[in-house]
């Protein structure tokens, strides 16, 4: 029982790591875009990170309530 809960919590590390990576990519893209005066295409990284954060939140809620 405890092992299943631990493995379920550890399974959330992958999506959290991807969300953090997307935020870092968004920040780097914004800085590069500001330096090269390019159009702001970095918003997609933040949208992806927010959606992954939402998915992790729902999954965590399912673990707690279910």
Image: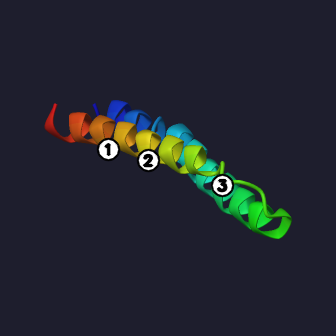
Percent x, y of residue 42: 64, 51
* Mark sitting on residue 40: 3
Q: Quadrant of the N terminus?
A: top left
The residue identified by callout 1 is 57
Q: Nearer the viewer, residue 37 or 42?
A: 37
- First in sequence, mark 1 or 2: give its number: 2
Q: Residue at x 39, y 34 (%)?
A: 8
* Mark sitting on residue 50: 2
Which of label 1 and label 2 is nearer to you?
2
Q: Nearer the viewer, residue 43 or 11?
A: 43
Q: Nearer the viewer, residue 34 or 18?
A: 34
Q: Residue at x 57, y 43 (%)?
A: 44
Which of label 1 and label 3 is nearer to you?
3
- First in sequence, mark 1 or 3: give its number: 3
Please, which residue is most extreme toward the left here?
A: 65
- Structural distance between the alpha carbons of marks 1 and 3: 28 Å
Percent x, y of residue 3: 38, 34
């Amino acid at each position: 029982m405890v092992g299943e809960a631990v493995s379920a919590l550890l399974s959330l590390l992958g999506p959290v790591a991807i969300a953090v990576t997307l935020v870092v990519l968004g920040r780097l893209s914004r800085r590069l875009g500001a330096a090269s005066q390019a159009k702001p295409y970095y918003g997609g990284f933040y949208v992806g990170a927010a959606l992954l954060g939402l998915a992790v939140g729902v999954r965590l809620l399912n673990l707690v309530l279910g």
